[in-house]
Image: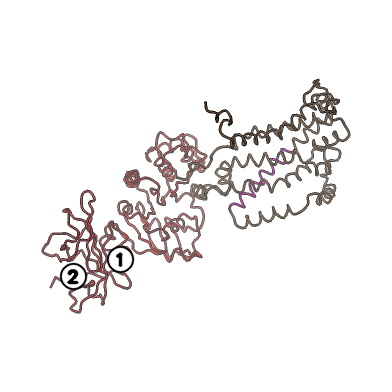
Chain colours: A brown, B red
Amino acid sequence: MSQRAVSMPHGGWTAFIRRMAALAIVLSAAIPIYLLVKQAVTPEIESFAWPPLWLPRRITGAHLESVFTVGELRLAISRSIATALVCGVSATVMGAMMGYAMARSRWGRRTGMSAITATRLLPMIAVALPLALAFIAMGLYDRPSAIGLALVHTALALPMTALVLFPAFLAIPLELEEAALLDGASPLRIFIAIDLPLVRGALAAAFILSFILSWDEFGFAVLLQVTNRTLPPLLYYYTVFGDVGAASALALLMMIPAICVVVALRPMLRGALMAGSLR
Amino acid sequence: MPELLIRNLSREFSSGAGLHDISLEVEAGEFFVLLGPSGCGKSTLLRLIAGLEPADRGIVDIAGTHAGYGARNGAVAMVFQNYALYPHMTAFDNIAFPLRLMKLGREEIRRRVEACARSAGLSTALNRRPAELSGGERQRVALARALVREPRIILMDEPLSNLDAQLRASLRVELKRFQRDTGRTVIYVTHDQLEALTLADRLAVMRAGTIEQIGSPRALYDAPANEFVASFVGQPPMNLVRVRVAPDRKTLCAGEAMLRVEPPAAARDEVIFGIRPEDLSLHAGPAKSAIETTIERVEFSGARYSVVARFGPAYLLTETAEPLQAGERRRFYFERSRVHFFDASSGRRLPRVDSSPG
């Protein structure tokens, strides 16, 4: 063995630095999650200890238990899931239509792009007040089903889903649609039988992004669902008025559905779908 | 009534390309080829027939029915240059797609897909996706998908151009036999003159958005209507030499070189003299004229030698059985009936002189 091999880590210095950088990135994401988990399962006194305790001394299930015994919380969970599902599905469906129009017509692209830019120019909070008033008038304000909030989230997510789906549709060769047209398919049939299956990955991505956008959304949720709350405002009230342990337990719970959606749809995000269509 | 009738069809593009005043008729059961260099509008014409693009003027009639821009209700099928197979479906589902749209029963679909796949030379690969198929198999799937609903007319846009030479040759033979057996009307686009000559019952040679000549391969080869058709059909191409007509109207001059051939009556001072490489021979004969050349280059090409011979400022291509020496003076003989004349300015064919040699 040469001395060089001893003094230098395997793969050379660049590989070592790269690995260290990767480790730093992983830790910066993992440490807050670890602390969250720790706070959720240890007595509150440990969370405020000074100097901080990095390892839990005593494990308790009391916080998680307390979270589940609160009736409001169960309602909030189902409300949040329903809102995120409605937002995910409707933003993906509408985003697919918009993205397709943008990919296939010049007018669609120009209109779509300026609409997306225009909505981004407005500070979201500026529209919240008029929106709340309009929702009161329409009876959509603070509904137990949170359907009004789901609509707002859909509107928030739509530019994003359209932008995700637009390049995916653009990548589909026009010949495929022409072939289907000559095979006797109607335009709607072509869209459903040819185009949609080919953008599966982008559809999954759009659904994940819009689901999570709704699941995390706080500003409109706190304004529009003042009594029938979704999880983010509830977590906020727990943190401000309740105890850290219970809030951590709730935050931990909030991570679960988002992770489930990503894991479930991951196979769809992969794969060279277009391979083999053309020569 | 022709199966396909096109009258004064035009399609303008802002670039200036497009189709200008195309008229043609295709009979039922005919193998009709559109031949031309890239950018001549042959694919555009095919797309207009398919209804994939609107025409600016003119009409397309399929089986006596006016066919505008839009779906053809199954009367027309198309094999795309790049096949355009549906990548998310298996070969079976690709072929079955048109039948499913017709809402046929499961058994009926299975029966017809399998029969069609068999006749297209495809039987083992039906449960595979396009990505898992070879080039030849993809080609067959595309063909089977076009055939399965039994359209009146099948359009093919350079369907063999993405295959290697060997496969192309064998599929060409198969395609022709297949068309003859089924009696389908085929309109086939290609830039390959050999493909056109071997496949076509009749062909149309196109250039810059217009049709230069329509006819059988034999007719186009023996009597090209103009200089362009003469140079485009045939490989190696026809020798075309710009010559001056001597005052005695019995001699043609190219630079210093001279040639004793009587020009057609319509010829003015200048004329294009054309002779196919295979019509030049080293052997004299009774009704033959001679052309005095200097051998410039000789290449061994297997069965024969490719020869480039200089005649005045022009070069003539031919093939010989015996090896010649570069630099050698040689005389080539040709039958006067095999000579083509084209107008020097318009390029149009000039009628041959049939008077006996003087």
Chain identifier of the residue bearing label 1 in the image: B
Give the residue at mark 2. Answer: B259
Q: Residue at x 10, y 64 (%)?
A: B286
Closer to the camera, A112 or A249?
A249
Q: Main secondary structure of the magenta part?
A: helix
Q: Is residue B213 magenta?
A: no
Tell me residue B19's x, y (percent). Answer: 44, 63
Apparent side of residue B244 relative to residue A73 in the rendered image (left or right): left
Residue A142 visible in the displayed image: yes
Query: Of the residues under marks 1 and 2, which one precedes in the sequence?
Result: 1
Chain identifier of the residue bearing label 2 in the image: B
Give the residue at mark 1. Answer: B225
| Label 1 in the same subunit as label 2 | yes
Outermost residue on the bottom side: it is B247
Closer to the camera, B103 or B232?
B232
Tell me residue B258's x, y (percent). Answer: 19, 71
Q: Is residue A87 magenta?
A: yes
Q: For the residue marked with disc 2, what is the amino acid?
A: Leu
Segment colored magenta: A84-103
Determine whether the residue tagged by mark 2 lies in a helix, strand or loop. Answer: strand
Looking at the rendered image, the disc whose residue lies closer to the viewer, 1 or 2, is 2
Determine whether the residue tagged by mark 1 lies in a helix, strand or loop. Answer: loop
Residue B263 visible in the displayed image: no
Tell me residue A37's x, y (percent). Answer: 76, 28
> Residue A10, located in which quarter of the rendered image?
top right
Quarter of the picture holding the C terminus of chain B? bottom left
Q: For the residue marked with disc 1, what is the amino acid?
A: Ala
Quarter of the picture holding the N terminus of chain B? bottom left
Q: CA distance from mark 1 to mark 2?
A: 24 Å
Tell me residue B194's x, y (percent). Answer: 31, 53
